Image (spheres, grey):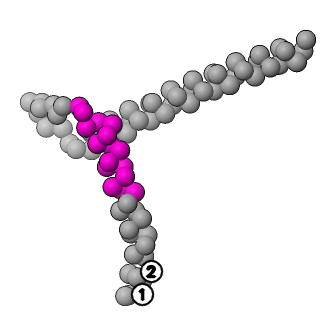
Amino acid sequence: MNWLTRMLEPLGSLLSAIGRFFGWLFDILFGWLPSIDLPFDIPDWVWTTAKISVLALIAVSVSRASLKRRKKLFEEASAEARR
């Protein structure tokens, strides 16, 4: 089993580095938000899911805006080609 551990060690260090990067990214993006104390307990996974959802919504909105811009450029190019 020692050989398996040695073979999987680079993968473990890569996954660890990716985890540290995402932790750093979340600290940069959400570190400025103050902690909120609620009168009831909310599991940690709820906050993690909310953070990921916000990032996904940002990505979707940016992609949608880019698609609209490209569609407009395509329509302008098509109209110009017809002339």
Query: Label 1 is placed on what type of residue?
Result: Trp
Give the number of the disc on residue 3. 1
Q: Does dot 1 land on a helix, a strand or a loop?
A: helix
User: Residue sitting at 33 percent across and 55 percent down?
Assistant: 20
Judged from this view, the residue extending furthest toward the right is 83
Q: Does dot 2 land on a helix, a strand or a loop?
A: helix
Q: Tell me the CA gap for discs 2 and 1.
A: 6 Å
Q: Which corner quadrant of the image does residue 52 belong to?
A: top left
Q: Is residue 16 above or below residue 72?
A: below
Query: Label 2 is placed on what type of residue?
Result: Met
User: Residue sitting at 28 percent across and 42 percent down?
Assistant: 27
Pointers 2 and 1 in contact (C-beta within 8 Å): yes
Judged from this view, the residue extending furthest toward the left is 39
What residue is shown with label 2?
7
Residue 46 versus residue 60: which sits nearer the camera?
60
User: Residue sitting at 20 percent across and 42 percent down?
Assistant: 43
Q: Which corner quadrant of the image does residue 7 belong to?
A: bottom left
Q: Of helix, strand and loop, which mostly describes the magenta segment?
A: helix
